[in-house]
Image (tube, rainbow, N blue to C red):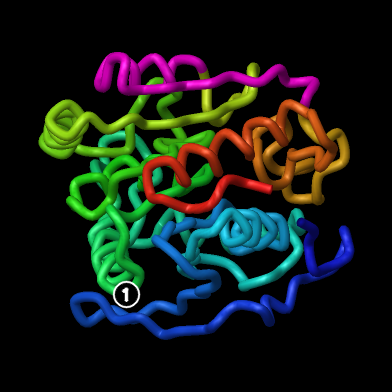
Amino acid sequence: MTSRQGRQGDDPLDDFERRDVVVDGVGKRVYVTGDGPAVILMPEMPGISPDVARFARWIRDAGLSVYVPSLFGVDGAYPRAEAAGTVVRRACVSAEFRAFAGGGTSPVVGWLRGLARIAHAERGGPGVGAVGLCFTGNFALTMALEPAVVAPVVNHPSLPLDDPGGLEMDAADAAAVADRVRRDGLTVLAHRFEGDRWCTGRRFAAYRALLGDAFDGRVLPADAANPDPPPFFRDVVGCAHSVVTAHLVDRDGHPTVRARDDILAFLGERLGGAAPA
């Protein structure tokens, strides 16, 4: 299982079907690949990078369909430091996102729930997986208010940016999510690096306080992170952060590869995909 681009180059995404999906009158580009039950993979900042696309292919190779919505940035672009002044700034002021404390649940989650309904209708199976990364990390949890979502993965969630112990959802949604998790026996899988300043231990503690033992939060040592990530992650993020994308070390037995395989197994068990290769 390998990426389709060089470590320093953009990804053409030419093995994905490009679709324009409309939910409640709002259209977005979605990249689709694979067969079997669906997983909605939401990109991290600054967009659908080659590393995010690589992770999508791993999900596909595990026997699942994957739907990757374009939410910000340039699709397939290699993550460069200058994205901090363009992509990140635009997302933080966008009406679709609630990047800071007190903003409540991001409105884009409603669109993502609609995408989950569409994907479930198209691909069948017991339900849909939702994987959020960084800026979109918590979206996977609030997507669980859609009954079709049965396998939420909340990886290194960074919102709200100004509250390390906060959750990017309003009180009513938080209560409803906790009720859904208890009622339907869901488990929420999550990963972060120790010492991550964007996704702190306080944030994981807040998830556990909300969800109890249903929250399976796993912490990797900081020195397990790829020491040579793309410029955006080196110069802007500035710490071990993206467990299964930019900071993954693609080597058998490595802690980040084990985290990737844990996610693939979690999705496969709940959705009925094949075991990861």
How many residues crowd mark 1 within 10 Å: few (<14), some (14–19), many (20+)? few
Q: Position of residue 246 (x, y in %)?
A: 73, 46
Q: Position of residue 223 (x, y in %)?
A: 80, 20
Given residues 276 and 57, the one toward you in this image is 276
> Disc 1 designates what residue?
122
Q: Position of residue 30 (x, y in %)?
A: 46, 75
Task: Note whether 204 is above or below 113 in the view shown.
Answer: above
- By secondary structure, the bulk of the magenta-drawn segment is best described as helix
Residue 128 placement, left or right of 189: left
Residue 143 seen by the camera: yes
Q: Quadrant of the N terminus?
A: bottom right
Q: How many marks?
A: 1
The residue under the point 65% across, 41% down is: 244
Would you say residue 210 sits in the magenta stretch?
A: yes
Residue 140 placement, left or right of 44: left
The residue under the point 43% across, 20% down is: 204
The residue under the point 36% across, 22% down is: 215
Task: Note whether 18 is above or below 10 in the view shown.
Answer: below
Residue 227 placement, left or right of 76: right
Q: Quadrant of residue 86?
A: bottom right
The residue under the point 65% across, 18% down is: 195
Given residues 240 and 100, the one toward you in this image is 240
The kind of secondary structure element at disc 1 is helix
The residue segment tinted magenta is 201-224
Q: Quadrant of residue 7?
A: bottom right
Amino acid of disc 1? Glu
